[in-house]
Amino acid sequence: MVKTTNQAPFTVGHCAICGTRVLTYVDLNDDGMLVHGCLRCGAALHDDLQSVSQDQLAEHGYEIAVASSCGSGGSGGCGSCGVKSAPVATH
């Protein structure tokens, strides 16, 4: 069971293989059930899952970095494709 908080789009959990709390990803297992996996090593995580907000990521060793677009604003080339900067989790 995942503990939830307000504005909590990220899930962290303890990974026994990595020996630390990690961000998780969600996937479907062979039975079509949602499962959480360690973002570092891919191990399945079942217990001690917690939803955290973007502001709480630093407490778990993560930060949000803004991905730069491929061009330099208004110069044409690949910068004219309309791709905007987006937040990404880094660790």
Image (cartoon, grey):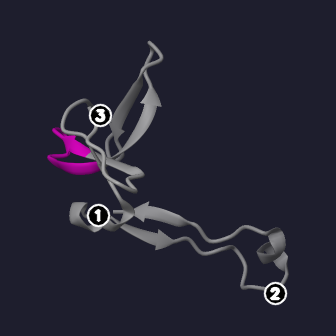
Q: Earlier in the sequence, mark 1 or mark 2?
A: 1
Q: Residue at 78%, 69% (x, y): give it.
A: 82
Q: Residues within 10 Å of mark 2 (few under 14, many from 20)?
A: few
Which range is magenta? 13-22
- The image shows residue 26 at horizontal and vertical percentages of 43, 36
81 and 9: which one is in front?
9
Q: Residue at 81%, 87% (x, y): give it.
A: 75
Give the mark count.
Answer: 3
- The image shows residue 64 at horizontal and vertical percentages of 42, 68
Amino acid at the residue labelled 2: Ser
Q: Is residue 15 above or below residue 76?
A: above
25 and 41: which one is in front?
25
Q: Quadrant of the C terminus?
A: bottom left
Tell me the residue that label 3 is attached to.
43
Q: Dot 3 lies on which element?
A: loop
Tell me the residue that label 1 is attached to.
56
Q: Residue at 29%, 63% (x, y): give it.
A: 56
Residue projecting furthest to the front: 6
Residue 27 appears in which quarter of the rendering? Answer: top left
Q: Dot 1 lies on which element?
A: helix
Marks 1, 2: nearer the viewer: 1
Q: Are marks 1 and 2 in contact (CB under 8 Å)?
A: no
Q: Quadrant of the N terminus?
A: top left
Q: Is residue 5 above or below residue 88?
A: above
The disc at residue 75 is 2
- Classified by dominant secondary structure, the portion drawn in magenta counts as strand
> Rounded to the nearest whole Å, what is the CA distance between mark 3 and mark 1?
23 Å
Q: Earlier in the sequence, mark 3 or mark 2?
A: 3
Amino acid at the residue labelled 1: Gln
